[in-house]
Image: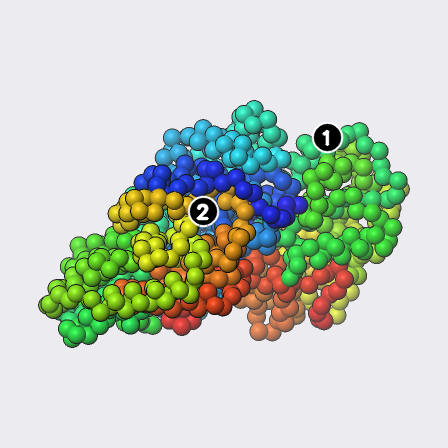
Amino acid sequence: MAYAEQIAKSLSTYAADSSGVCSALFELGGMVVMHDASGCNSTYSTHDEPRWYDFDSYIFISGLTENEAIMGDDEKLISDVTDAAKQLSPSFIAVTGTPIPMMTGTDFAAVAKEIESRTGLPTFGFDTNGMNTYVSGVEMAYASLAERFTKYMRPREKTKEPSVNILGATPLDFSGEDCYTQIHSMRKMLGENGITVQSVWAMGDTLQNIMNSSSAWANLVVSYGGLKAAKIMQREYGIPYVVGRPIKGLNEAIVAALHKSFKDDENRIAYEKNTHADKKILLIGEGVTSESLACVLGADAVIPTEFDSELLRNGTLARGEESLRNIAQNYDVLIADPLYQPIVQSCTKFIPLPHEGFSGRMFSAQAPDLVTEIPFKI
Amino acid sequence: MLIRIGGKQDDSGARVKISAAAYPAPFKSGLEYSCAARGTWNIVHTGFLLPQSHEIFICAMGCLRGVVLTAAEMGFSHRFSTIEIKENDVYEGTMEDMITSGVSQILDTLDYTPRAVLVYTSCIHHFVGCDIQLCFDILRKRYPHIDFADCYMDPIMRKSGLNPDQTMRRQLYSLIKPAEKNAKKLNIIGSDLKIDTACELFDIAKESGAAISQIQDFDTYDGYQSMGQAFANIYIDLSAKAAAEALENRLGQKAVCLPQSFGYDEISTALNTLRGLLGLSEKSYEEKRKMCDEAIENVRQTLGGAPVEIDYTATPRPLSLARLLLTHGINVTRLYCDSFSAAEKSDLEFLQKNFPDIDVYATVQVKMRELDRCRSCKTLAIGQKAAYFASSPYFVNIVQGGGMYGYSGILKLCGMITQAWEHEKDTKNLIQIKGMGCNCHGVC
């Protein structure tokens, strides 16, 4: 059926790339501007950003109008951003795109360069277009940080004790009643295994710590959004990376992989193919999370967000309500965000696993700390 | 990590004394901040006022996210579908096919047959020159048993004629079919929140033997169609002007503007307009005015000179409300308004002349993100944004006028102020709920 992948009779949709950029950079003292008419900022701050009420962060929209878009008035954007930067003194500036700027061909790299020359602040231009998931936005943001900010501190010596940067942490994948719970748990788990956390990109940490990332022994990629930054840091500083989300049952494998990588500087994937479950179990969600959990449970995974086929062990890439429904009907158990319930057939047991990137704030308080518990039985 | 520890004091650019506030835009336009108050309705909420309808939004993922979760939070996912526009769709010139094929695939596989479908196209469709009329012609031919309304999520057009909010109100009533007129039937249209049936408008109707209907009265599509029998449509919210005029042109229903106000003379004028329309003689409403004076005096004594802050989401007439309270001795200190409506111009001029030191704050100006939200004393807020910016648990939790109208509305508001002053609220949780009062047919 034409457009089948694009039609949702009743399913939700993932947070978009521009929200991913905002979420990734939220805590770092920068100013992020979504070049958009209206709506992106309230959508982001209502559904995609649990920190919005309590933490001040400079996330704004440009308020693009029809006239400005048609006339190609980039000067309005540039001067408004410059003016706001003078009022607020952010650490850096990022400008993200949305559908209409994509259609009018806004040159975000040029816009960023112009803003940087006027403000003297490091400025990023992101070619987001609101048509990809948050994962690609997180990826862009962290890759840019890796390209630019870590260089300020090079060359760096490694820390005396084994250390890692955690790459790819945003509330869109790591939520809960307190969205920092899983970050604390990851730090604790690694610390108990003799590994210090140099930085967390980017929850509960500072831009200064992130700038010191090159002193870590390895990078731990906990969501696909962190992979590109890991590859950049490997290229620039020779830091190896391990892919895997700390989850009870996989933590030991992650720690073992990290220790191996500390020694041989090789990259590793901590999760493996596992087909040992008694029942046919399917997971739907972000790539690294789904693959990691699938490894623990002996499940298959379907990944509707951006992911690299080289990282697939238990999963496949698929999108669209109809495709997901057809796949899910072949399984005894489906584990997915509660808003996937409509695709579940009566013969399939559904286990809700809240995912902020899909259902936003609706179930985030019930999101479990997977580092310490898997709160369901198959 | 940025943590709020005290807030900034420099409000230049975000604040202006009302005496110096330019009409209609007191602040320089620039980047915009979105504060965490979410109680106002959006076009999803408004669309769901149409009974037995289904909403289909066609847009990019980033634009769909907000509306799909609005519907999900309402528990209305079963009445809501989406078609996601990808990059190739923009360049391949297949947008019309995408609309007609996509909508058809949804309708052919839904578990129920809606009586009406609201199809929302977006900014992208305008920019690619999509022939939206052709799409609706095809859909209407293909599904003759379903009524289709063309709706729009096109915020980029918000300064190009009607804004999306005004257009939505117009389109919500666009499916009403011609019917034989009844001189004893009127509608109130264009208000998201149901207008309180205890207000004077309903008293007047009853006195003349007429009945007033609102879309919120109906839980069936046939009930909604009965609104076609009214001989006149009252609109209170000025953003419904285009809706009323469209119905006047299309169905011959007289458009009657009885604007929301807190000014006694303006209220009496509106009420007497309705009385005249229904063949009743004018009234002075002196008794009602006295009742309001007494109620406001009680509020004044209760507040004891405490500062009051009002925002534009509480009522479409924040300056009119401020004028009423100030002229009765209540200490209104701050207004939160990004612009002033035409209906408020005389109130603005009055306040500029008589209360020149009132502070007007923007809500979207970038400095509002970090401006100090601590107050040195207990502060009453009227509206969710005022509550947020004042960090006050003492607030009147209303949006868009709260369905209140006329003298009865003032009396009710006075009661709400007293209640708000005496009982703390959980500001953080309450103001983040979307679409306050959106109890469309008791479901959402």
Mark 1 or mark 2, whichever is nearer to me = 2
Foreground residue among B408 and B17: B17
**Disc 2: CA contacts within 10 A as few (<14), some (14-19) or many (>=20):** many
Q: Are marks 1 and 2 in contact (CB under 8 Å)?
A: no
Q: Is residue A258 above or below residue A157?
A: below
**The C terminus of chain A, quarter of image:** bottom right
Find residue B286 and report its image quarter.
bottom left
From the top left corner, tell me how far across and down residue B85 is, in percent.
Answer: 46, 47
Q: What is the chain letter for disc 2?
A: B
- Which element type, helix, strand or loop, lies under badge 1? helix
Foreground residue among A306 and B334: B334
Three-letter amino acid code of the residue under disc 1:
Lys
- Name the residue located 49 percent from the left edge and 51 percent from the top edge: B389
From the top left corner, tell me how far across and down residue B183 is, in percent.
Answer: 13, 69
- Name the residue located 42 percent from the left edge and 71 percent from the top edge: B443
Would residue B97 be visible to someone looking at this image? no
From the top left corner, tell me how far across and down residue B312 is, in percent.
Answer: 38, 52
Would residue A188 be visible to someone looking at this image? yes
- Name the residue located 72 percent from the left edge and 71 percent from the top edge: A377
Q: Is residue B262 above or below residue A147?
A: below
**Which residue is label 2 attached to?**
B363
From the top left corner, tell me how far across and down residue B34 is, in percent.
Answer: 48, 48
Q: Is residue B394 above or below residue A132?
A: below
**Which residue is label 1 attached to?**
A151
